[in-house]
Amino acid sequence: MGEILQEAINKRKNELINKLIVHNIFKKDDKQLFELSLRELENEYLYIQRECHPHSDSGSVHWKNCSKLTS
């Protein structure tokens, strides 16, 4: 059971690290992301979610090659 829990923790840590990297966050204070605990990563990601504008680069819809239709 301990191995399953550790695997789940590592999987969640990797997910959070990837999400933070999308927001150009590679370190917290003097620590690399992989050195942080799950709790620290969760807190950092929650902070970014609160501070990030919903229409910023990540997670938003961007229209490309669209032209306005005229009648």
Image (cartoon, rainbow, N blue to C red):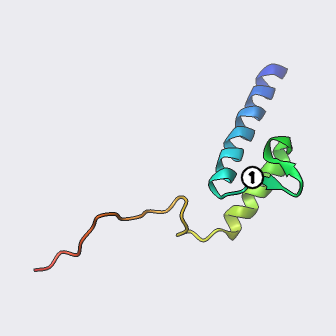
Task: Look at the picture and state if 27 lies above or below 55.
Answer: above
Lateral position of residue 31 relative to residue 70, left or right = right
Q: Percent x, y for residue 28?
A: 83, 56
Q: On the rendered image, what quadrant is the C terminus found in?
A: bottom left
**Which residue shows up at 67% across the image and 51% down it?**
21
Front residue (pair 1, 51):
51
Local crowd size for mark 1, using a 10 Å CA cut-off: few (<14), some (14–19), many (≥20) = some
Lateral position of residue 55 relative to residue 5, left or right = left
Q: Which residue type does callout 1 highlight?
A: Phe
Q: On the rendered image, what quadrant is the N terminus found in?
A: top right
Q: Secondary structure at mark 1?
A: loop
Numbered label tally: 1
List the single residue furthest toward the right: 30
**Which residue shows up at 75% across the image and 63% down it?**
47
Front residue (pair 53, 26):
26
**Which residue shows up at 24% across the image and 71% down it?**
67
Task: Look at the picture and state if 67 lies above or below 2.
Answer: below
**Which residue shows up at 14% across the image and 79% down it?**
70
Query: Which quarter of the picture shows residue 11?
Result: top right
Query: Which quarter of the picture shows residue 34?
Result: top right
The residue carrying mark 1 is 26
Q: Is residue 40 visible?
A: yes
Q: Percent x, y for residue 17?
A: 71, 45
Q: Percent x, y for residue 23?
A: 65, 58
